[in-house]
Amino acid sequence: MLDSHPRIFLPPETFFFVSLAPRIDADPAADPERAAAQIASRWWIRDMGLSVADILRALEPGETSWLALFVAVVRAAARGAGADDHVLGEKTPRHVRIAEWYLESAEDARVVQILRDPRAVLASFRRIRIGTSSAAIVGDEWVHAVDVHRRLLDHPRYLSLHYEALVHDPESEMRRVLEFLGLALDPAVLRFNERERPGFSPRQPHHQATLAPLTRSRLDAWRDELDARAIRIVETVAGDRMAELGYAPAFPQHPARPFEVGASRAAGVVHRSTALRLRQLLKRFR
């Protein structure tokens, strides 16, 4: 939705701090050219149309940290889209892991986090067959994201919103987000599904849902899409945080047993180490 604003640019997810920086063996401070070359070699960066030269040109003189390279990738993508004078952002969900460090490291940074019912998150992952299908791992990662939210709740450059509130009243919620970013609400934001720039790679068809308007009918779809065991596992892992945020349990008297949670975590680890890596490998050759 934010990328539909005429003064904001968000590239497709860069996965910079979760899939790029941890796997690059070049030190950007010692050899920024090599680091930029390894970044530009990844399929999702290539799909943005970015070259090594594009990234290096966008790098601020004398700045060779991982943060500077991250900003350079986003800035290079903006320049390629003719949006280098826009407010720049990035939307990789797992970057919530580095939100606190990012706010400390970048004085002009802002962080906006969307909080959503973890059972709906799991149902979404299973529906689009991306991410993990493990109820326990979804619960673990959701708890971590909520803990980040709790620690940043009073930070002046942090804002959170509930996905459910966004669906029910998108105009009020997006006005609040844009005011936080120092911008006014533009009608195009509420017509985000009509945007010209999709905001994702053709190799990411699971993001097609972002081209559809928000609908309240999907908020509780997890009740029909998830089996009782998966629901109980999520609620057992994330129950305390769910209660804090107002998400009532469906099975308050029937928590998952420890071996069920453990089996779900183990299955998720196996899935990530095999199926997901195979999927990423196949994308390289499409």
Image (cartoon, grey):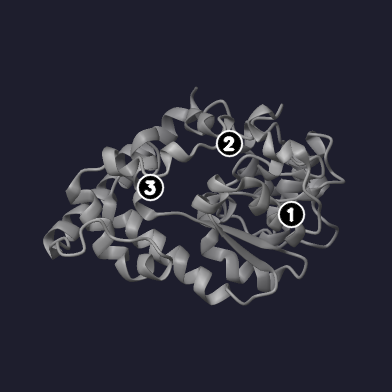
Q: CA distance from mark 3 to mark 2?
A: 27 Å
Residue 23 shows in the view: no
Q: Residue at x 40, y 54 (%)?
A: 117
The residue type indicated by label 3 comes to Ala
- Image height check: is 238 above or below 41? below
Q: Which mark is residue 120?
A: 3
Horizontal and vertical percent for residue 85? 87, 46
Locate residue 137: give its quadrant.
bottom left
147 vs 268, nearest the viewer: 147
Whether pointer 1 and pointer 2 mark residues with C-beta atoms closer than 8 Å, the reply is no
Residue 227 shows in the view: yes
Whether pointer 1 and pointer 3 mark residues with C-beta atoms closer than 8 Å, the reply is no
The residue type indicated by label 2 comes to Trp
Q: Earlier in the sequence, mark 3 or mark 2?
A: 2
Q: Which residue is mark 2?
A: 44
Of tags 3 and 2, the one toward the viewer is 3
Locate residue 63: give its quadrant.
bottom right
Q: Which residue is mark 1?
A: 178
Asked if residue 137 lies left or right of residue 41, the reply is left
